[in-house]
Image: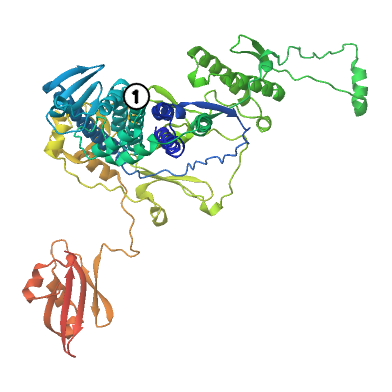
Amino acid sequence: MITYLIKSGLCLALLLAFYHLILEREKMHQFNRFYLLGSVLFSFLTPLYTIYIEAVPPTSEILTPMIIDNNITMEIVPLETEEINYTQYLLTVYAIIALILLVRFTKNLTTIFLKIKQHQKIKKEKATLVLVDDTISPHTFWNYIFINKEEYYSDKIETELYTHELTHALQKHTLDILLIEFLQIIFWINPTFIFLKKAIKLNHEFLADNEVIITHKNTTEYQYLLLNRAAWNNEYYLASNLNYLLTKKRLLMMTKQSSRTKILLKKLAVITLLIGFIMLFAEKVEAYENNNELLDSEITQGELPKEQITTNSSLEDIKNKLNNANSLKMSFTEKRDTFNVDLPNGEQLKVWEDKITDYNKLNKKYEGVRNQKPHYIKSSEERQKQLNDLFSKLGSLYFNLSKTDKTKVKRPVPPHSPYVRLKKEGDVYYKLKNELTKEDKKLLPPPPASNKTNYTSVKSDSIPKLKRIVNGKKGTFTYTTKEGTTITKKINELTGEEKKMLPPPIRLKEKPLSIKLFEELKNAKNFAIWIDGKSVNNNVLNNYKNTDFYNYNGSFVHKNARSKRFPQEYQYQLNTKEYIQKIKKQLPPPPSKNKKNVNSEKKLGWIVGNKAHEINIPNKSNEKLNVFDIISHDKILNNYTIKRYFLNNKEVPEQHLKKIDYLNLETTRMKKISDEEINIYITTKN
């Protein structure tokens, strides 16, 4: 759609530029009026026109096959976040601006109609005079000519002005303005319509001026009249009126002399221009040249030669021939299956399915039928079905060829080519590749496999050697050695080296379920729910409380991912506390990071001066140690007199350290003040 709007807008802009450069300066105003209006229609229709061009035979395409690594057994998939649809916001803003312009347009129309209704009206020839109290210059809307009431009764309105405004009314110039105004509301983003409206209004004035000169034959007097009226104002922007900025062009046009030959050449140039723009902006589709002779030809009607076997040869003769290889001549015929192909013209073709030449002939015949007009996407359902059947049989013949034979022929082209067939929510539609959006590309099927299989060399070191599977229910661990041997063991029977191969444990973080969300999840229309890994009815939540659940997770489901069973917009997984405890029992213990046994003692590091040393504090389950206990039991620290204590960069009394658990320590440091005195600096984790 965006491509169409760009082409249409560019075409209209070029047509308007040609008008200003070539046509506007010539006295062919009636032709120019229809040129300007026709430019709008032409710019809308040209991008929709399709030109069929001769297709260039495509070169065989080499595709690299996708290698799926089945060694990967565990994968963490993050929840997909919903993308912001900026297109929807832009369309909303576009519609709001268009609505504002429509309200403005309607308001101005209403103002004019109220003026007509509220003021005195007088019939004059084929128009109606509307006498208003405002001091305005005469102007026209449809068949109504607005003039000042006082000037009308005092006969101050010149006859030339009556003729001028009457021409606007009789030639329906208001219709042109209303049409452009309406298009400008819809396509307000295209500035070309602003300049187009000005060009149309000026051309209207040229037409009315020309009628005045023809009727009254007094150009000079009429020019003076225009100069005197140029400064008058008009409050109705939809009406035809005199404008000072246009006066100069109008005065020059009245005295211009145009050559008929020059006008004719410029009109002919318009035809050339339109043909060129059709070739430039029309949609181009590749098509093969239609060859009717192919439709009337036959691939083959001959019977396959039959092998004749003589029965007069004796066994002895055969043995003698076998002894002499040159005297033995063998001939054979490979049995070939046949099937009939129905063409759209009613003809039946007999095809040998393993013959390359026969395949090529059938493919040419298919291409000849496929490229007949109209195109497949514009054909009747009956013709589409016939082409689909022919393409299906041609495809069967192609895929029954050997790999070697496939490299010698061309893959069948789908009947809807060059368009891409898309199917969304049961609806089928077609688009060109350059018109596909990101959403459209997601609907495309995977590319077909190539005739030639090409393999990319991969270093053996880059291929995973081990397969690791943890079975939580059975409590087993399965892995594959570098030699390819698969070993399965109980987790509690694993060696130290085998435990290092265990994957990291699953994180089971607590996430409380709020009462508000708990109540919302009972709505089966919007939410599909699973409890402890099983899909359940939403009414089951009535048997639970929100506090019964340890954690949960949920996500929004896009339309193309919903199913008949789960059509809801949201899916949530709820895990009960009992279920999480069961999973935790099944999980293997995490591998130890330290080589030494850390269960017997807790190691704490101190920095004394520029050297570090460790002190061992026994883990006593019945006794809670604090920071002061550790300091007082340290042999090295006891060699000094502790002068001051600093906790998190603030000085604290000694008693304060007795309240801090030593497990909460982050860093510890001592600073010597003298040979006998030190300060202690401590930071905690929180």
Quadrant assignment, res 594: bottom left
Q: Nearer the viewer, residue 211 or 379?
A: 211
Quadrant assignment, res 15: top left
Q: Quadrant of the N terminus?
A: top left
Compared to residue 599, the image places residue 57 above or below, namely above
Callout 1 secondary element:
helix
On the rendered structure, is 336 left or right of 504? right
The structure residue drawn at horizontal position 76% and vertical position 12%, both measured from the top left corner, is 302
Residue where numbered disc 1 is placed: 215
Mark 1: give few (<14), some (14-19) or many (20+) Cα within 10 Å: few
Compared to residue 194, the image places residue 509 above or below, namely below
Task: Indicate the colouring scheme.
Answer: rainbow
On the image, the x and y values in percent for residue 518 come to 15, 35
On the image, the x and y values in percent for residue 328 come to 90, 24
Amino acid at circle 1: Thr
Regarding residue 5, the answer to whether it shows in the image is yes
Q: Nearer the viewer, residue 214 or 342?
A: 214
On the image, the x and y values in percent for residue 508 come to 25, 46
Quadrant assignment, res 662: bottom left
